[in-house]
Structure formats: C-alpha cells, structure tokens
Amino acid sequence: MREQDKMTMEQAEAKMSCLREVFPFVRLVKGSVLKDREREPAEGLPRVCQCYEFWKKDKPCENCISRDVLDSQGEESKIEFIDDQMYQVFSRYVEIDGEPYVMEMIKDLDERTLLDSEGYEKLLSHLTVYNEKLYKDALTGAYNRRFYEDEVKDMKGPAGVAVIDLDDFKIYNDTYGHHAGDLVLETAADIIRRYVRKSDMLIRYGGDEFLLILPDIQSDIFAAKLKMIQERIYEATIAGYNRLQMSVSIGGVMFNSGDIKEAVSRADKLMYRAKKRKNMVVTEWDVKDNPKKAPKEESEDLRQQILIVDDSEMNRAILTEILQKDYRILNAEDGEQCIEILEQKGTAISLILLDLVMPKMDGFEVLAVMNKKQWIEDIPVIMISSEDSAQFIQKAYEFGVTDYIGRPFDAKVVYQRVFNTIKLYAKQRHLLSLITRQIYEKEHSNRIMITILSQIVEFRNGESGPHVMHINILTELLLEQLMKRSNDYHMTWSEQQMIVTASSLHDIGKIGIAESILNKPGRLTDEEFEIMKTHTLIGASILEKMELYQDEPLVQIARDICRWHHERYDGRGYPDGLKGDQIPISVQVVALADVYDALVSERVYKKAYSHEQALRMILNGECGAFNPLLLQCLMDIKDKIKWELASGMTEDYARWEDMAEVSEISTESIKKLTD
C-alpha cells in the first residue's frame, strides 16, 4: 500500500472534495461494513450495505470490486449497468486513522463519452464476437447450455419445443473414433438449421442432445418440420464413413405458458419413448389425439414396471400416486414378497423402490439376494428410507443401490429421479445390445474370411466342402461338454470361440503339398506320406511368419493347431511326438473333431463310414489314441453331433442309419479306456 493512501479523516474529506469536481458521486465505504454485508444479519435486522440505496439493489453485487479491493489493498474499476444507464466505478483502498476503507468514485457514461463513431462500431463488433463465444457451441455452431440458462429458461410462449437425441452416438465414437462423432454432431446441426427459421433457436443441450425452440409456430407445421429433420438426418451420409448410419429420436410439445423447463421435461419424456424404437418422432398430440398412431410401448401392458417395496401401506400409496400415470406399479409389503415377484418377473421389472427397514426380510437382505443372483446388474434399485445416517446410506450404495430418496417424499424429486434412472439403464441396455451385435457381426465376418481361406485349401485338396464347417461344429460341441464335465481345463466362452475359429485353419499347410499327392486316389507310398506329414509344419510356418500378429491369441492357437493336430495322446503322432497333456487341450479337441469328420466323409481314397462305425473305430483305438476324457465327452454328445450335422443339410450325412447300434457301444468301451 502506498503512503499517500494513509490519511486522516480530515485529509480524506479534502481529497474527496477535489474528486467531486470530476466524479458526481464520491463516497467512503468502511471495510468492516463491506465484510458485514456478507454475513446473514440477525433476525429482524436489515442487511447493512451503503451501496444498496445508490444502486437501488436489494442484494449485494455479484462482482463487487470494492470487496476485492479491500482484500488486495489496491485499486480496480468496472462498468456497471442499472436498467439502461451505464456507470463507471473506481474503487481504491485507503487507511483513514488506521482503519481500512474503500474510496468509491462513480460517474455515469454514454456512448459519446466512451468512443467516437468508429470506435463505437468496433466496440459493438467486439461485444458481438464475445457474445458469440460466450453462448455458442464451438463444434456445432448451435447455442450452448449457458445460453439456455441465461436467455431461454425464462421465455414466454407460444413456441414449439423439441428434444432431439442422436441414436447410438457413443457407438460412433467407440467404433469410428471421436473425429467421426464430431462429424455426426456437425452434420446433424447443419441439417436441423436448414429446416428452421433464423428466429428459431437450436441449442446443444447435452453431449448428444439438441433442444430446438420454434417461437410462434402452429403445431402441424412444427410436427412437419420435426418429421422432415428426422428423415433428412437418416438420409445423410458422413464423408469417409459410408457404413455409419445416422438417426435421431425426437420428442415434441407445444409451450404456451408457464415454465419452459416443464415443457422441455415433457419433450424429453416423449423423446425417450421415441428412442425405444429409434429413428422416429413422437409428439404429445400424436399420443393424445391419435392413439392408433401412438407407438406400441404406450399401451397399458407395455409400460415399464416399477416395484415398490415398503411395509407402510401409506408410503406405497403415495409413491403409486406419484408414478402410476406413466408406469405400471407392483407392490410388495416386505422383502420376501419382493423376491417372489423378482423370481416371477425378472428383468421385466424396470426399477425397484426399496425401503430398508422392514419386518421378515429387510432391504439389505433383499439387496444381498439380488447381488447373489446378479439381478442388481440389470435392475436398478432406489433406496427409500427415513434413515439418513451417512453410514447407513454408504452401506446401501456398497450393496449396489443407484440412488437414495429420503422421506417425506417430494413428488417432483421422486418422479424425476425415477425417470432419470430408468432412462439411464434403458440406454445402457440398448448400448449393450448394439455392442453385442457389433461384436457378433465382426466375429461373423472374421469367420467368413477364415472359412473362405480354408475352403480354398479344401477345394485344392479335393475334400468335401462342409469339412471346415463340420470341424467348427464338432469343436464347439466338444468344448462345451468338456467345460461341463471337468474343471481341469477352464476356458471362458471367448476363449472357446477363439479355438473354434482357429480350427478352420488346421489344414492350411496343405497349400504347400503337391496336388498329385493330395488327390492321389490310392494308398500313399512311404515317401509320399512323409511329404504329406509336412503340411503340419508348413501351416505352422505360415502363421509364424505373420510377425505383425505374433502376439495375437488367435494366431498362437491356430499355430498350435496347425502343427500338432496329428499328435496323439500316447505319443505316437507327428511331427513332434508329443504325449498326453504336452498337447494343448485346444489341439486335442480339434484333432478328435478332425478324425471323426474324416471318417464319416468321403475322400478320394475311401468311402464314408457311418456315424456309428466312426464312433466304434475311434473308441477301439483304430485311429490313434485320444484323451479318455474327450472320448467321454464325444459319447455324451453323440446324439447331438448327429442332429447338429444333419441339420446342416450336408450330403455326407444323408445316409445315416438308425442310432440304436451306437447305444450298445458307449458304456463298456469307455470303461475299458478309463480303467
């Protein structure tokens, strides 16, 4: 602080007298007064603030520079608006007789005071750019949420209000990257702007949600615009992402009076209904005036079900009254009834409102059962209780509840939290189904390509076309049964599917064998057989040379299968003479599947054996030794094998005989092998 800012009251009065020749209003504000006005006054006493009378305000300024100057012991200035009048305020820290004060100097301003005409235009341009940055979303050019909060939420009707949600937006980001997601948002915003007026307001309301407000518009024109927007977005393409299919779900309402936030909430609910079927528009007059055109989900039977679990009949009645308009309500008086209903309904329950203090079975016991049965992963639970201790609530959250609502109930809070929770879980389920479908489609495409490659080998080998498909089916059936029979070879479903996929490549090494040997109709000579055996090493070598993918589990499994699928459990196979569990279990399974299908298929050097003959030959050791556990699995599923392969409608199995003969083989043959 400067020395000249330390003075007596007499000196301060003299200084202020000089300043009044420049500033119409000069005053001193005591530091203690500035601090006191931040505190709540005692009951019955007015707030103390000297500036209220001058500024005609009933509360402190949000950006009081005098309070800032008191802390910094410096000086600041600002421009203050009161109605349409503009003032310039200077605040300076001083000490008078050892006490802290702020000296304020205030003068009114107008455009002529500030700038010449050229400067005035520049100022307007600068303020316009500032306003754009303040209220515009940088990516889409739409208004942002701040604009809604500052400028829209207090607007009056009439207006059309629509919530527009981009379907599957997270999938775009996760699958194609954030650049694609940004292009989707930009494209959608551009299309919407194309079909609205300059006076209409497009607001980016959330990450993938837009709010569209069309003042002074008729409902039929509003509905037509929304439909046009929905159709044009669906027809749009994203440059560089031809496989990306855009769509939006739209909810629309008319806002005539009252609180626009309530209209936005109604539009949001309708958008959520539209989202159940995706790529559609739902307006409130469609649902109200044209029930035949309303989506099927609006029917009484298909509304989401909420289970209210509370031993108080009054509490159940209150919650039912709040929610029954939009949801089907089920009631349970205690935890035992809750579990019974969950056993019957399962995930048909969209949400549980659960009291925790109940007789017979309390809420924590219900949550324990839901965790044990994994219901908690699919059915959200909102705790309803008058217990509000932090320890109590924390325990409930640890059990997996989604939210907590205390009693007494606030109807609006209850409804909004229920709606938000159901909406969130519905989006998650929808997203999960999309991801599952994408994974399936990707895996399906991968298997098609691998099958094409393996079929090229089979075609060159002159073997039956369905051989690869048979190996896939047999491998999958054997793995499933192995997991049921034994805990020695634990594999996840994903790992099992990887083995099934890799089994298609078991014979790719045959691409390096001369056709004269591959398709020789008679018995191979010893020299020819030695050459034929090298297909195992050739196949493994092909995969080992794929340096870019050497760390991929699929390539590693396929390499093992290529090299060792002719190894045998007693060590008498080739090329490395592996024995027992030296052979990976994935290879053992594929080897058994390969031998079975080779027996029942016609080859250039042999006729096809029947299903029954093939099983007998394998069990009697005529085709080499196999893991006894796998032989048990083979016999467990012998009927299923015949059915699965026959349902594939392949010619190889058109001549199957009655199965009665096989049933006589199983028990004794298996027992001999396992003794």
Image (tube, grey):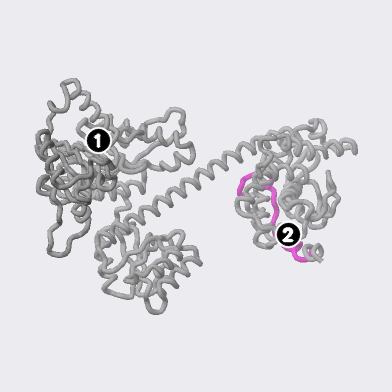
Q: Would residue 491 be found to the left or right of residue 229 on screen?
A: right
Between the C-alphas of marks 2 and 1, the distance is 69 Å
Residue 418 belongs to the span the image colors magenta: no
Viewer-nearest residue: 509 or 107: 107
The residue carrying mark 2 is 662
Instruction: Locate the C terminus and report the quarter of the image it occupies.
Output: bottom right
Estimate the x, y position of residue 56 in percent, counting from the top left. Answer: 10, 47
Viewer-nearest residue: 563 or 54: 54
Residue segment shown in magenta: 647-668
The residue carrying mark 1 is 225
Amino acid type of disc 2?
Val
Q: Residue at x 48, y 36 (%)?
A: 176
From what the image shows, is residue 362 above or below residue 650?
below
Q: Which residue is most to the bottom?
A: 360
Estimate the x, y position of residue 391 in percent, counting from the top left. Answer: 41, 69
Q: Would residue 30 be found to the left or right of residue 611 on screen?
A: left
Using the rendered view, name the quadrant where residue 302 is placed: bottom left
Q: Visible in this render: residue 616?
A: no
Instruction: Locate the N terminus and report the quarter of the image it occupies.
Output: top left
Viewer-nearest residue: 596 or 84: 84
Tag 2, which secondary structure? helix
Tag 1, which secondary structure? helix
Q: Residue at x 15, y 43 (%)?
A: 11
Residue 71, labelled with which disc?
Answer: none
* Mark 2 vs 1, N-terminal side: 1
Q: Residue at x 61, y 49 (%)?
A: 647
Dot 1 crowding, Cα within 10 Å, few <14, some 14–19, many 20+:
some
Dot 2 crowding, Cα within 10 Å, few <14, some 14–19, many 20+:
some
Estimate the x, y position of residue 533 in percent, counting from the top left. Answer: 83, 40
From what the image shows, is residue 664 above or below residue 540?
below
Amino acid type of disc 1?
Lys
Q: Visible in this render: residue 38?
A: yes
